[in-house]
Structure formats: C-alpha cells, structure tokens
C-alpha cells in the first residue's frame, strides 16, 4: 500500500474524525445562536442563509465521519431552511417566521446531544481487503499446482516461452506453505484438487487477490461451474491449449492492471472531507491528488493527468458545475470523466448538473467501500476507453500511427542526448499458409501469441506496436546493436518453440526480423525503412532469424539515408 499500513490509515482517519467533532462542537453554539436570533428582517435572512449553508455542508460530511444520525438531522433542518432561502423573495420573511418555530429549535438543539452521543461508526472495517499491492512485474509469475510431475514440467516449459516464470507445486498444501503474500500473481491449479482447493479459498483471503485459472481432465458443466463458483477467472481442459492459456493469463493481467492504480483528482474545499477521501481511496490502491483551491484545477490537471475528476458542487464562491464546463473548454479534457460528489440531494438539480458537462453524480455522504468501488469502476472504464482509441484490438499493442509517433519521439531523444536506440521490424513467416491451412481464427491466436511474448520479453520502457497485419515494430531505447540482436534473436528462438494446435494438428511458426540503429539515420522514417530492408533481406535468405541493417550487403552502417 502506498502510505504506511492499514493500521496507519485507520489511525489517520480517527484523527480526522476527532478534528471534525472538535470543529463542529465549536461551531454548533455559534450557529444555533445565529439562527435563534434571526428576526423577520434582512439581517435575519442573511443569518438564515449562512446557517443553511452550514447545515448543507454538515449533511454531506457528517455521515462520512461516521455520524449518520447527526447527518440526517442536519439534512432535515437544512430542508426547513431551504423553503426560506429558495423561491421568490416575496413572502420570504413570512416563510422565515413559519420555519423557525419551537419544533425547529428543539431539533436544532438536539444536534448537540447527537454529536456527543453518536459514537460514530468505526472507521473502515471493510477496507482491509481492498488494499492492492501494485507490482506489475509479479504478473509474470505463475504458480502452477499440478500433482502430475510430467504435466507440470511440460506446461511450465511451454509457458516459460512466453516469458512467464513458473513455479510448480505438487499439492495445494505445498503451494500454501510457500509465500502467499507476494501480491498479485497468477495461480493455475488442477481442478481435480477441488477438495483441497475450496477450503484453501475459504481459509486464505489472499487467494482472492490472485488471478486464478483452473485446469481439468474432466470438462463437464459441473466441473466448470464449480471452478467459476470458487472464483476462477479462466478454465482450460487438459491437455491444455497453451497459446490460449497464455492469452487468458495476459487478459486477466491486463484487466488487473487497468483496475489497479487509477488516478483520481478530487476538487473539494472541505479540507477534512478531502483528506478523508484521499486516505480511503489511497488505501484502495488509487493514486489521489486533492485540490482544495478550485482556481488551481487547470494547472493541476495538466500536471497530474487523472483518469477521473471528482468534484464538489458548492465551493463558494465557485460552482463545481461552472468549473466542469471550464475544464471542457480544453479539447484535451473533453473525454475526462467528471463525477460530482456533492450533498445536493434534489434529483432534478443533480440531473441538471450532470447535463452541463459531467458524467455522473454521487450523493454525499457515501460509504468508504462504495466510494472506492465506484471510483475504481470509473477509472477502469476510462482507462479501457483511452486504450481502445490508441491500441490495436486484436493484440492490445500500439496501433500503426501511435508506434510511428513514439518512434519519432525516441529518435529526437537520441539526437538530443546522444543516446543509442534500435528499431526492429518483425514479420511472421509464411503466415498466409497458416491462415489458409488452419483458418483465420487460429492465425489470430498466432498473432496474439507473438504480441504476448514481446510484451513479456521486452522491458517496460521498450515500445511495441502492431504495424500491419502480421508485422510488428519494436523500439528499444538505450540499447546497442549487439544487445538488440541478442534480444530479437531470443524472441525468434522462443517464438519458434511455441506449439500451436488446430483440430488436433500441431504446428510451429517462425518469424523474420530486421534491426536498424536510430543513430545511423537522418530521421525516424528512414530508420524504420532500414529495419524493413533488413527484415526483407532475412526473408530472402532463409527467414526464421534476425538481420542487422548494417550487415546487409551494400550497407556499412552509414547509409545514404543517414544524411539529413
Ligand atoms: N489471421 C489473421 N491474418 C492476418 C491478419 N492480418 C493480415 N493477415 C494475413 O497475413 C497474411 C500475410 O501474407 P503475406 O504478406 O503473403 O506474407 P507471408 O505469407 O507471411 O509470407 P512471408 O512474409 O514472405 O513469409 C495474409 O494472408 C493476410 O490475410 C489478421 O489480423 N489476422
């Protein structure tokens, strides 16, 4: 978890609650006196308006600090004063006299005892399980529980070709005895061990944070149902279709990555409340930026680049609705989800606020657990949509145009800082015959397998794109020619070892790659053409391997294209 442990969060929330109680206790006497002395005149109206704003804020925040009964009472009193301050000015004084009756003051006074007697719901009892360790490299670790050593060994070997580090256990007990607290990893288990698995899931809450896939010899409805009921994210009959399994692991990992570590910006002028939200969302695994000064929203947006913006509506003298419209003035933020988090409880007002440029409305107070789940769901959706626009739908890699942009950026970076970087073009060999022989769907699996292998074998900082049908481009920053050759050769070797199957026929596919060093060219486009030329050279000379542009006959590493 980002800041300290769960106990630390609970302690900080308790401190905030104490601050809230101390502040409200001090304000109570002042506001009760202010409203009590409000006469049927202009000064009295001003006092009632002030008291109304105060009750409105309390109604939205008290529940968050665990004072639900107090918050509800504040809401009812706020509604009594709303009748006075809203609506036409004629008759306002008469409405004031009617609203401030003996019953109103009895209820206003009762706020004191409610604050003192309401022990407050205990802070965050359920959030402990929501903590998510964000360590994406762990997503490449696979724990395989398989009692048959031969099946275990073969599957581990096949999965390791995709870059997974596989640890095999021969029983659920052996797996549980190992380190369970390593965070999010993939667990693949033979479902024939169901009798051991179900109690393990019941006993070990950590298992619920793992990405679980079950395997079974017996592929029946009942077995699949059992697997789903245990919480599995995938099911594969034995013998396993390894490329499809690797694909499912990748999908689950990506879903997890999309849902973890979302970025939330909160614009809220109530500092205690803002800090409470920050702690709760941070504890839920999100990155949070709080703005208590609404005028800073634009500069902070550019700096923090959130996935979602949570905004209070009443932040005198600012209105969240106008701020949302202002944010939308900038085309860059047109797609940013804006969600109001406000104590406004009039449905019509809520709908009208959303209609003016926001996406949703969350009414305060909101429980901590619900806040985390609503914000996480929104962040995940926003990240998925953003990805859809720039990513290839079959592989999830960058699309043609984006990879070219990224290559151009890397080219400028190399020129500016004198660094080395390589670009490689990869193309599957005889892919037309794969499609013709095994069908287009199997061809798609082959394409996705190469994408998954590249994602796992290359560094996080490397740039990978699907350039065309069965063509891929990778850019390797800070990478010399010999190292690039080693990396790409390794990808070729691993890929050619993957066994695909279609209607009980097994087959393997190879690829050809060409590498060019960015520093040897005058622009990014020329370097890409160099890599392409090297790749075609490889195609002509036997395929299944890597060729360096500098070694292609006639190219001495300082080609004509190098001159700017
Ligand atoms: N399954 C599948 N096939 C695709 C996709 N995009 C392109 N292809 C196919 O990829 C094949 C490319 O064939 P060619 O350009 O003739 O090349 P090749 O057969 O790989 O031959 P060499 O490159 O010379 O080794 C064509 O059959 C395309 O239909 C895709 O998204 N899915």
Image: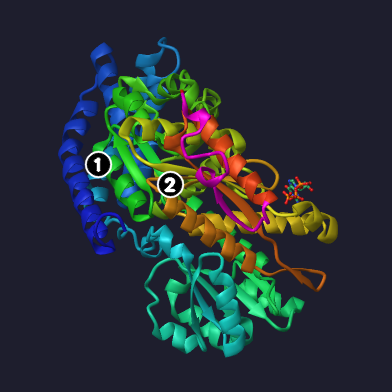
Binning the other alpha carbons within 10 Å of mark 1 as few (below 14), some (14 to 19) or many (20 upward) gives: some
In the image shown, does 290 or 39 lie closer to the viewer?
290
The structure residue drawn at horizontal position 46% and vertical position 83%, both measured from the top left corner, is: 175
In this rendering, position of residue 47 left or right of residue 168 = left
Residue 284: % across, % down: 38, 55
Is 472 left or right of 129, judged from the image as shown?
Answer: right
Q: Position of residue 420 (x, y in %)?
A: 38, 41
Which comes sooner in the sequence, label 2 or label 1? 2
Question: Which residue occupies 56% across, 65% down?
Answer: 162
* Coloring applied to the structure: rainbow
Is residue 444 on the magenta stretch? no
Could you tell me residue 384's position as x and y percent?
A: 56, 44
The circle on residue 184 is none
In the image, residue 504 sits, relative to residue 479, either above or below, namely below
Task: Decide: few, some or many residues near mark 2? Use Cα within 10 Å; few <14, some 14-19, many ≥20.
Answer: many
Residue 272, labelled with which disc? 1
Indicate left or right for 128 with 330 as reference. left
Q: Residue at x 49, y 59 (%)?
A: 457
Q: Which residues are magenta?
A: 541-563
- Tell me residue 395's x, y (percent): 63, 50
Disc 2 marks which residue? 262
Does the Cβ of the disc 1 residue fall within 8 Å of ligand 1? no
């Amino acid at each position: 978890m980002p800041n300290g442990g769960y106990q630390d969060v609970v302690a900080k929330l308790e401190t905030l609650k104490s601050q809230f109680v101390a502040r409200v206790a001090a304000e109570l006497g002042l506001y009760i006196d202010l409203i009590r002395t409000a006469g049927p005149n202009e000064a009295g109206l001003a006092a009632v308006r002030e008291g109304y704003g105060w009750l409105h804020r309390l109604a939205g925040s008290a529940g968050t600090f665990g004072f639900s009964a107090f918050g509800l009472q504040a809401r009812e009193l706020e509604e009594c004063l709303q009748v006075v301050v809203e609506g036409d000015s004629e008759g306002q004084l008469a409405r004031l006299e009617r609203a401030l009756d003996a019953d109103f003051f009895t209820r206003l006074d009762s706020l004191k005892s409610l604050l003192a007697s309401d022990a407050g719901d205990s802070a965050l009892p359920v959030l402990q399980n929501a903590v998510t360790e964000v360590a994406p490299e762990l997503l490449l670790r696979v724990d395989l529980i398989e009692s048959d050593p031969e099946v275990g060994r073969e599957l581990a070997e096949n999965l390791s070709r995709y870059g997974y580090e596989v640890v095999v256990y021969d029983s659920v007990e052996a797996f549980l005895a190992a380190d369970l607290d390593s965070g999010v990893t993939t667990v693949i288990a033979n479902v024939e061990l169901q009798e051991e698995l179900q109690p393990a899931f019941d006993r070990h809450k950590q298992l619920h944070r793992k990405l679980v896939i079950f395997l079974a010899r017996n592929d029946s409805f009942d077995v699949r149902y059992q697997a789903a009921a245990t919480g599995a994210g995938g099911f594969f009959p034995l013998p396993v279709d390894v490329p499809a399994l690797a694909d499912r692991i990748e999908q689950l990992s990506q879903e997890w990555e999309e849902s973890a570590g979302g970025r939330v910006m909160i614009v809220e002028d109530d500092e205690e409340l803002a800090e409470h939200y920050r702690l709760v969302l941070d504890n839920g695994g999100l990155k949070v930026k709080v703005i208590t000064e609404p005028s800073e929203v634009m500069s902070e947006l550019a700096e923090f680049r959130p996935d979602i913006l949570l905004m209070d509506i009443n932040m005198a003298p600012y209105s969240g609705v106008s701020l949302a419209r202002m944010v939308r003035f900038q085309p860059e933020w047109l797609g940013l989800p804006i969600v109001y988090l406000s104590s406004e409880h009039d449905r019509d007002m809520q709908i009208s606020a959303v209609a003016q440029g926001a996406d949703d409305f969350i009414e305060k107070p909101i429980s901590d657990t619900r806040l985390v789940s609503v914000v996480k769901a929104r962040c995940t959706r926003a990240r998925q949509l953003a990805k859809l626009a720039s990513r290839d739908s079959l592989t999830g890699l960058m699309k043609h145009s984006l990879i070219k942009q990224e290559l151009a950026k890397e080219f400028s970076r190399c020129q500016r800082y004198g660094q080395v970087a390589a670009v490689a073009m990869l193309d599957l060999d005889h892919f037309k015959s794969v499609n013709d022989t095994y069908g287009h769907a199997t061809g798609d699996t082959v394409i996705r397998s190469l994408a998954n292998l590249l994602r796992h074998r290359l560094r996080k900082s490397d740039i990978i794109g699907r350039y065309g049908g069965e063509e891929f481009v990778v850019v390797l920053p800070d990478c010399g020619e010999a190292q690039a050759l080693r990396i790409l050769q390794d990808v070729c070797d691993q890929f050619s070892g993957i066994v695909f199957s279609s209607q009980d026929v097994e087959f393997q596919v190879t690829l050809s790659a060409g590498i060019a060093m960015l520093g040897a060219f005058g622009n990014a486009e020329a370097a890409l053409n160099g890599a392409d030329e090297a790749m075609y050279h490889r195609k002509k000379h036997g395929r299944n391997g890597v060729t360096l542009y500098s070694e292609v006959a006639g190219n001495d590493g300082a080609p004509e294209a190098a001159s700017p």
